[in-house]
Image (cartoon, rainbow, N blue to C red):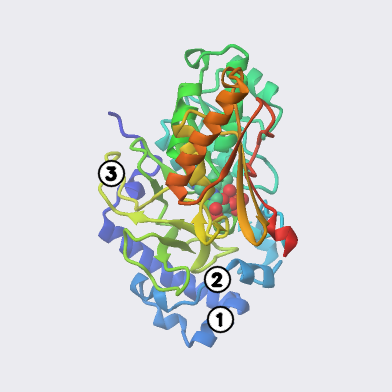
């Protein structure tokens, strides 16, 4: 197999060399932040840590954490480490509640971010022979701009579609023979469904690969998208606070995402105690940006729950891997005292042959939590009799109960009755919050 890398020296560097590089960068970065960000200097002073106490990555644990609450407190300029004259871009989170997170970039920050996205595209088999269709949103959201920059760096013919207008997506995809599709997994599933309805078979679709991220998605969802579109589907991870997509990306092995750890130093901590956990333990992912100039967050708590692993990878990359995040700790539902990730329900639905079009509703009745799951049927499934549907609902409820340990009420609903997503899917409605 031909192994392609965008920046081979870094992507295949020995672990010792990588740690040395990270240590050098960390020392410089802590000094830069301490001298230029009074907000973080105060946090360090409160903890009694001086830049000279951090001599390498082994001292990382001495530094204070940053959380989303800090970002809100310091909004908009409080964590800026460069004069505004040196900044060329802002991007912002898609957050719907509270203040948005605003991240700043110098030209160098944009450049390194685009390199990260280029690494992801090359790992998915991309080259200057490819036509890369970018159907992530453009604008303040980082998905479109990040992958657009990466696609240019690789030399792909870039189709800056943005999200939505699915008919037009399909027209450009087929007329211009797009070979790589970049969008959220839920939008990829929707595009796949629409292509199928228009009579396209997987072998008629020009795509060969997809780079899908920005929301949690299961292995079952991956297989379903791969089958419908006739492609290999690669995961990509990132967050606005650390730059955007490309913090980590998947290679052909599809067993987790390589973290671009020359730029982003990762740790896993216990979300309750803040204690650093050993490799291989599940916990909250924390990132330290080693190269960012304008918005260099140190020990930023992502709230994403996952596991790190340094197992040898068949692609030849030595970059540490993170497992697919199960979801954010704040997406986790606590239903009748049981921790539930929406992705667990998705796994069951797809395993049982249902579509990824579902909605989870949690409420409270008579002081008891209720869990209702609405799952859309395909037109074939919908032709069953009412009695058959009732039996299927029972079977599905029992499969979900086995996975979660609690009884849901399942509702199999007609085709097209659940809204499709063109960006990040909103699958959970927690009505309990309305009563609080
Ligand atoms: O979603 C950046 C991005 C754009 C990543 C395009 C990948 C592709 P935010 O809007 O700030 O940034 O949301 C970041 O989304 O903390 C995770 O909870 C979630 N997330 C991102 N990628 C994945 C993924 C972009 N591959 C938040 N799997 C993160 C699971 C993901 N969750």
Q: Where is residue 33 in the image (x, y as percent from the top left)?
A: 54, 73
Res 245 visible:
no
CB atoms of marks 3 and 1 within 8 Å: no
Q: Residue at x 69, y 22 (%)?
A: 168
Please tell me how crowded label 2 is: few (under 14), some (14-19), or many (20+) other residues with Cα within 10 Å. Answer: some
- Left or right: where does residue 88 sit relative to residue 267? right
Q: Is residue 39 above or below residue 207?
A: below
Q: Mark 2 points at which residue?
A: 66
* Residue furthest to the front: 387
Front residue of 54 and 128 = 54
Q: Earlier in the sequence, mark 2 or mark 3?
A: 2
Q: Is residue 134 above or below residue 379?
A: below
Quadrant for the C terminus in the image = bottom right
Please tell me how crowded label 3 is: few (under 14), some (14-19), or many (20+) other residues with Cα within 10 Å. Answer: some
Q: In this view, does 176 lie above or below 295?
A: above
Q: Name the residue under label 1.
A: 43
Q: Mark 3 points at which residue?
A: 313
Q: Quadrant of residue 263?
A: bottom left
Numbered label tally: 3
Q: Where is residue 255 in the image (x, y as percent from the top left)?
A: 35, 42
Q: Is residue 340 above or below residue 71?
A: above
Q: Quadrant of residue 380?
A: top right
Q: Where is residue 359 in the image (x, y as percent from the top left)?
A: 63, 41
């Amino acid at each position: 197999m031909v192994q392609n890398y965008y920046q081979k020296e870094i992507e295949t560097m020995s672990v010792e060399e990588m740690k040395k590089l990270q240590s050098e960068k960390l020392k410089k970065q802590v000094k830069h932040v301490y001298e230029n960000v009074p907000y973080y200097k105060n946090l360090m002073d409160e903890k009694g840590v001086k830049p000279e106490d951090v001599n390498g990555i082994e001292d990382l644990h001495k530094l204070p954490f940053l959380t989303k609450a800090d970002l809100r407190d310091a909004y908009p300029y409080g964590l800026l480490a460069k004069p505004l004259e040196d900044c060329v871009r802002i991007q912002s989170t898609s957050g719907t509640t509270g203040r948005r997170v605003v991240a700043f970039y110098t030209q160098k920050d944009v450049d390194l971010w685009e390199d990260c996205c280029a690494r992801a595209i090359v790992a998915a088999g991309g080259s200057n022979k490819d036509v890369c269709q970018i159907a992530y949103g453009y604008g303040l959201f980082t998905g479109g701009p990040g992958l657009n920059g990466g696609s240019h760096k690789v030399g792909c013919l870039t189709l800056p579609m943005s999200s939505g207008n699915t008919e037009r997506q399909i027209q450009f995809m087929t007329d211009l023979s797009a070979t790589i599709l970049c969008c959220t997994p839920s939008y990829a599933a929707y595009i796949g469904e629409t292509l199928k309805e228009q009579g396209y078979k997987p072998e008629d679709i020009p795509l060969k690969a997809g780079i899908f991220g920005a929301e949690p998605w299961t292995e079952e969802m991956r297989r379903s998208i791969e089958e419908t579109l006739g492609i290999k589907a690669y995961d990509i991870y990132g967050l606005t606070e650390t730059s955007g997509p490309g913090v980590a990306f998947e290679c052909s092995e599809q067993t987790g995402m390589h973290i671009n750890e020359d730029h982003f130093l990762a740790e896993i901590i216990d979300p309750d105690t803040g204690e650093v956990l050993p490799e291989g333990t599940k916990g909250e992912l924390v990132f330290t940006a080693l190269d960012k100039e304008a918005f260099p967050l140190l020990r930023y708590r992502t709230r994403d729950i996952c596991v790190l692993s340094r197992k040898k990878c068949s692609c030849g990359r030595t970059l540490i891997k993170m497992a697919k995040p199960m979801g954010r700790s704040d997406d986790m539902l606590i239903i009748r005292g049981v921790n539930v990730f929406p992705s667990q329900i998705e796994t069951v639905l797809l395993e049982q042959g249902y579509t990824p079009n579902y909605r989870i509703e949690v409420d409270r009745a008579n002081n008891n939590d209720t869990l209702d799951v609405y799952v859309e049927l395909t037109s074939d499934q919908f032709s069953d009799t009412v009695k058959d549907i009732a039996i299927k609902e029972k079977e599905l409820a029992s499969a979900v109960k086995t996975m979660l340990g609690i009884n849901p009420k399942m509702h199999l609903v007609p085709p097209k009755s659940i809204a499709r997503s063109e960006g990040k899917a909103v699958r959970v409605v927690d009505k309990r919050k309305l009563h609080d």
